[in-house]
Amino acid sequence: MVHESYVVPGEKLNNAELCEAFGCSPQGGMRRAHKTNTLVIVSNHIKSIYDDRWLEGVLHYTGMGTKGDQSLTFQQNKTLAESGSNGVTVHLFEVFKDQEYTYVGEVVLESKPYTETQDDEQGKPRKVYVFPLKLVSGDRLVEKQESRQCRECPFSQS
């Protein structure tokens, strides 16, 4: 199995490669992997009801739950909210092209989650939790940058 440490920022993976590298589920925006003690979060910029946005180097990432008010104690919202103390490493991927996941890097909470109103999947206003996340490396690669391929990954293409 490919380990997540072989994935480098800017690298583009398909869903199967992402799941192989992190040992996570093939679906969802927040994918917990107990085997690797990681949480993979996906910010999909092409098809999503969530209003994820970068502001001054911080990703304001909307929590889990597509209908009705979100809860901070619900599934991976709780994992992400407690990521500063639960030992789980959080990895961010962004989607700008269908079925292509661009690895951004490891992220940590910049500050406590806050609430705001966003529409749910039925277009009804509801309370969501927003997680301010910053990159551990401090640098965000732009989405148009050429992918740097991982030399040691068996699925890399030169």
Image (cartoon, rainbow, N blue to C red):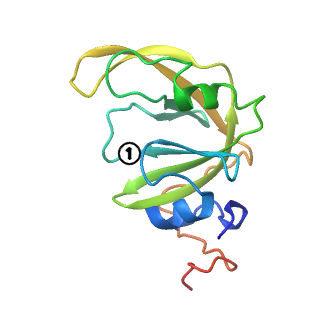
Q: Which residue is mark 1?
A: 45
In the depicted structure, whether residue 44 falls above or below residue 156 = above
Query: Could you say whether the residue bearing mark 1 is in a helix, strand or loop?
Result: loop
Furthest residue in direction left, as rendered: 122
Count of numbered badges drawn on the protein? 1
Image coordinates for residue 52, horizontal then vertical, percent: 45, 34
Q: Residue at x 55, y 18 (%)?
A: 72
- At 44% from the left and 14% from the top, the residue drawn is 116
Vertical comparison of 153 with 63: above or below: below
**Visible in this render: residue 141?**
no
Q: Position of residue 46 (x, y in %)?
A: 32, 48
Q: Quadrant of the N terminus?
A: bottom right
In percent of the image, x 40 and y 27: which residue is there?
A: 65
Observer-nearest residue: 120 or 16? 16
Looking at the image, residue 86 sits to the left or right of residue 41; the answer is: right
Q: Name, please, the residue furthest toward the bottom.
A: 158
The one nearer the camera, 148 or 47, is 47
Q: Amino acid at mark 1?
A: His
In this rendering, the answer to whether 112 lies above or below 30 is above
Residue 4 in which image quadrant: bottom right
Q: Quadrant of the C terminus?
A: bottom right
- Horizontal relation, residue 77 to residue 51: left or right: right
Badge 1 local density, few (<14 within 10 Å), some, or many (20+)? some
Residue 124 x/y as whole percent: 24, 17
Displayed quadrant of residue 85:
top right
Please give the name of the residue rendered at 29% of the width and 23% of the height, measured from the top-left corner: 120
Between residues 93 and 55, which one lies in front from this camera angle? 93
> Is residue 89 among the parts visible in the rendering?
yes
